[in-house]
C-alpha cells in the first residue's frame, strides 16, 4: 500500500478540510493532502452528516477523513469529521438555538474570568475583575434577598 495512485495500488485515506457545501447539499468541496488537482474538488458525502456538523467543520477548519471510490483520487468521499478542537485558537459555533447542558454543572472560562452554573443547587456564579451588564430597555433583578457588597 502506498500514497500513490498507480493502477492496482490501494489509495490510502487522506486528511483534508471541507471548503464549502454544494447548494444541493449532496456533496462538499474538499482539499486534502496530496491533492493532485491543485485546487479543491467536489466529494461525495459518505455518511449522514447534519448540515450543522458540516458548517462547524467549515467554520473551524476541522480535519476530515477523505477516502476514494475505486482508488481514484478524482472521486473523493468525505467519511469522517474530527471534532476534537484541542489547542485551536478559535472555535465558532453557529446555530439558531444553542444548548450547552451539564447535568451537574457547566463552567464558561476565559483566563481569569468565569461563569459557573451549578445545576444541583440552581446557582450561577460569575467571577472577574470587572463585570458589566447592559440593557437597552429594561434590566430586572428579582429575588427574595439581594446583597450589595
Image: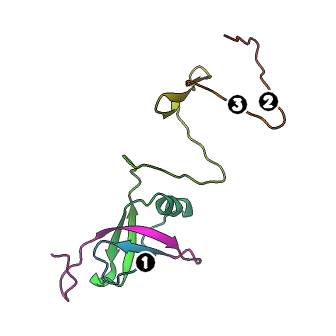
The residue located at (23%, 78%) in the rendering is 11
Give the side of residue 137 with respect to residue 133, left or right.
right
Which mark, by number, is residue 148?
none
* Residue placed furthest toward the front: 130
Give the label, 2 or 1, closer to the camera. Answer: 2
Give the side of residue 98 with respect to residue 1, left or right.
right
Region rendered in magenta: 1-27
Q: Position of residue 20 (x, y in %)?
A: 51, 71
The residue located at (47%, 50%) in the rendering is 90
Q: CA–CA distance between discs 3 and 2? A: 9 Å
Give the label, 3 or 2, closer to the camera. Answer: 3
Pointer 2: what residue?
A: 139
Q: Position of residue 130 (x, y in %)?
A: 60, 25
Question: Please, is residue 72 above or below residue 77 in the view?
Answer: below
The residue located at (41%, 59%) in the rendering is 62
Which mark, by number, is residue 43?
1
Q: Which quarter of the figure is the N terminus placed in?
A: bottom left
Question: Please, is residue 149 above or below residue 49 in the view?
Answer: above
* Residue placed furthest toward the left: 1
Q: Are marks 1 and 3 in contact (CB under 8 Å)?
A: no
**Residue 8: in magenta span:** yes
Q: CA–CA distance between discs 2 and 1? A: 50 Å
Q: Position of residue 41 (x, y in %)?
A: 42, 80
- Mark 2 / mark 1, whichever is N-terminal: 1
Q: Is residue 104 visible?
A: no
Pointer 3: what residue?
A: 133
- Mark 3 / mark 2, whichever is N-terminal: 3
Q: Which quarter of the figure is the C terminus placed in?
A: top right
Q: Are marks 3 and 2 in contact (CB under 8 Å)?
A: yes
Q: Which sits in the foreground, 112 or 126?
A: 112
Amino acid at each position: 500500500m502506498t500514497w500513490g495512485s498507480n493502477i492496482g495500488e490501494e489509495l490510502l485515506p487522506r486528511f483534508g478540510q471541507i471548503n464549502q457545501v454544494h447548494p444541493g447539499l449532496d456533496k462538499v468541496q474538499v482539499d486534502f493532502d496530496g491533492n493532485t488537482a491543485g485546487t479543491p474538488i467536489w466529494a461525495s458525502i459518505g455518511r449522514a452528516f447534519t448540515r450543522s456538523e458540516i458548517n462547524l467543520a467549515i467554520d473551524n477548519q476541522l480535519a476530515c477523513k477523505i477516502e476514494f471510490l475505486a482508488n481514484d483520487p478524482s472521486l473523493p468521499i468525505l467519511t469522517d469529521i474530527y471534532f476534537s478542537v484541542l489547542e485551536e485558537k478559535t472555535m465558532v459555533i453557529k446555530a439558531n438555538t444553542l444548548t450547552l447542558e451539564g447535568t451537574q454543572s457547566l463552567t464558561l472560562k476565559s483566563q481569569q474570568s468565569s461563569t459557573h452554573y451549578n445545576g444541583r443547587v440552581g446557582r450561577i456564579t460569575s467571577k472577574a475583575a470587572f463585570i458589566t451588564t447592559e440593557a437597552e430597555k429594561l434590566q430586572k433583578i428579582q429575588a427574595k434577598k439581594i446583597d450589595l457588597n
